[in-house]
Image: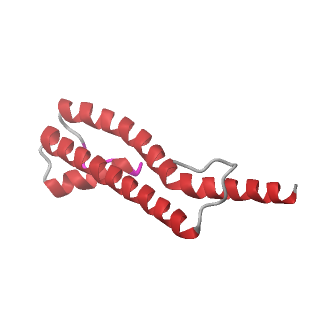
Amino acid sequence: MYEPRTKPLLSRRAFFRRLARHSAVSSILVLGSLALGATGYHLTEGMAWLDALLNAAMILTGMGPVTPVRHVAGKWFATFYALYSGVAFLGIAGLLIAPVAHRLLHSLHVDEEDEA
């Protein structure tokens, strides 16, 4: 997926295409995670869809739930959704940062080779 250190730095156009692909995948993961959370809160707690979406968004971003969880099934769901959200948040952040970090490190390596 990424060019090795022996290859030249990607053109800006190709880099922005790569960045757009990573952003699209990240957006799909965020939307899927929100859909999973909203559906879970709606089914286990009987929340209205908007309240369920708000709770899912708050958990996914690490802020905590807005509406208290009252049912046992809802507590089980909230526990596992919170664990999933922590991992998903880190994975999505890594996916967004990876192209920029790779380009930065690759450009530093290319400069080093040019001097030698």
Left or right: residue 64 versus residue 9 is left
Please say whether residue 113 is visible from this viewpoint: yes
Query: Which is more toward the observer, 42 or 110?
Result: 110
Left or right: residue 8 versus residue 91 is right
Query: Which is more toward the observer, 16 or 114?
Result: 114
Taking the view exactly as shown, the residue that stands out farthest to the right is: 116
Which segment is the magenta one?
Answer: 61-68
- Residue 51 in the image: state x and y as whole percent: 20, 55
Quarter occupied by residue 42: top left
- Residue 16 in the image: state x and y as whole percent: 50, 66
- Residue 106 in the image: state x and y as whole percent: 68, 54
- Residue 69 in the image: state x and y as whole percent: 23, 40
| Quarter of the image with the C terminus in it | bottom right
Taking the view exactly as shown, the residue that stands out farthest to the front is: 7
Query: Which is more toward the observer, 29 or 112?
Result: 112
Query: Which is more toward the observer, 114 or 90?
Result: 114
Left or right: residue 19 versus residue 30 is right
Q: Main secondary structure of the magenta part?
A: loop
* Residue at horizontal 54 percent and vertical 63 percent from the top: 15
